[in-house]
Amino acid sequence: MSKSGNKFVEWITSIPNEHKGFGKQIMLLSKNELIKTYKGAVIGPLWAVVKPAFTVFVYWFAFSVGIKKLRDVGVNLGGPEAFSIDFFTFMFVGIIPWFFIQDSIVQGSKTLRTNRQFITKVKFPVSTILTYTGLSRLYVHLFLAIIMYGYVVFHRVAGGLPPVSVYDLQFFLYCPLMFMFFLALSWSTAPMAAFSKDFESLIVSVMSGIFWLSGIMYDSYSFKGFLKYAMLINPINFFANGYRNCFLYNRWFFEYKTEFVIFMVEFIVVFILGIYNYNRLRKKLPDVL
Amino acid sequence: MSDTIIRFKNVSKTYILYKNDQARFKALFIKPRNPKTNRALNNVSFEIARGESVGIVGDNGAGKSTLLKMITGVAFPDEGEIFVDGKVAALLELTAGFSMEMTGRENIYLKGYILGLEDDYIKEIEEQIIEFAELGDYIDQPVRTYSSGMKMRLGFAINVNIEPDVLVIDEALAVGDASFKRKCKDKIKEIIEAGTTVLYVSHTASSVKEICPRSIYLRKGAVIYDGNTEDTLKVYNDYKESVKNKKKK
């Protein structure tokens, strides 16, 4: 009994243990990863802004100028009164977390393959690879989030509202939660993608589909009946709507309990699956990479 | 018992050879039935005491690399237990584990962190490493700009200057020009004389004799002989002879 108990403790603590004492190394490598991504380009780190800015422009152009019907988005949060938000603001606040999510899923699953020298050549706490590459994406996200916040403040002042709101503070809940959720997801996907290139391709090919199935360009609350609940299962909606809770809806995360509970259950499942898959495949990684 | 630094207890390792990528993808979800396997190590047991120098001999594919990978903590056994006590420096693939975009200096820290060293200690040996590697001002340039010789020199310098408890050396190692090679040999000798445990891998007999009083002979993943180097090499050579003779017939 005690032996299997020990084994369970070892199993559940394997990832935290790999991080113990490697804080400095993780910070150093995450900084390096960030430099690596943008080095050699003339405008360097500005690419971190240019690419998403262009994407935002294209969507805005297509939907606000091209398809003229979609100028405003009506949002009904369950209360008696529905209100409308201009499409650009609605989309902008939702797409900022999406950029992070997209990168986390795609790059996150490729990470172990691209950093294979740390797995096959030297003894290395493998799970920290996922942490430091995730952190480097988080830096970019924080930078974009600051730009977005600047826009939100401007938008509020222009609309005669106070520039800041207490709901903004929820960012410090949603953002870390998003980081942790997709980190835990990569504990599963990264070893599996390292094992099989097909799995990696599978993830890449479903990504653009996932974008359109998530409430980035439209309001995921606007459905009725079965679809309304189906949309709650998609964790990406939780974050897109979460950011809108902070900056647009003036709503607390606990106000829509069903959404929050469904997400937390998913989070726990993803977390446990992540630990399971990581432990299952960790020791085989040096043999297959 | 307390001065054992490396212990292998009934260690076995099997590589699964997947037929194709499909089979590999399937293996993610279902355990493959009767897959083709390659048993790289078969029930290997031995102990090495602190300060001992041990040679490992055997033909290609005998399991030498797998064994070393396990000692350095890169690969893991399927069965059995491995115990390694202390810092392991490996003079195997010297350029491995470098981050190409980071400077040489940053890579010293990186390697240090991987080995579990503290900032203060790395700072102490930093200059020593730079001096040994003869890199000069290049130390603050990204490693990607280094020539392959410079990279190897840096890798070697880091590994020998961290005061390892176990030093793993591959004989096939080639480091830079003749004068640097001599410097490396001297340094290795110095480390051995300081009482560091050394594992020395080789295909050829003479160099093993020079360094190691004890040797382990591996064939097809199993320990065939473990003992005095003279005796081990005799067994090894006898086997080689017998194979040769068989071929002649």
Image (tube, rainbow, N blue to C red):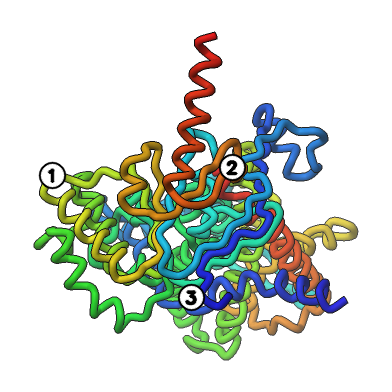
Residue located at (70% from left, 37% from top): B25
**In the image, is residue A276 above or below residue B226?**
below
Name the one closer to the observer, A192 or A235: A192
Q: Are marks 2 and 3 on the same chain?
A: no
Which residue, given by chain and number where applicable, does mark 3 sit on?
A152
Q: CA distance from mark 3 to mark 1?
A: 65 Å
Q: x%, y% of residue B101?
A: 29, 56
Pointer 2 and pointer 1: residues touching (CB < 8 Å)?
Answer: no
Look at mark 1 in the image and give the residue it sits on: B178
Left or right: A38 as drawn, with respect to A238: left
Residue type at tag 1: Ala
Give the left or right position of residue B117, taking residue B72 as reference: left
Circle 3 residues within 10 Å: few <14, some 14–19, many ≥20? some
User: Residue A207: x, y in percent?
Assistant: 62, 47
Of B13 and A258, nearer the camera is: B13
- Figure check: B34 above or below A93: above
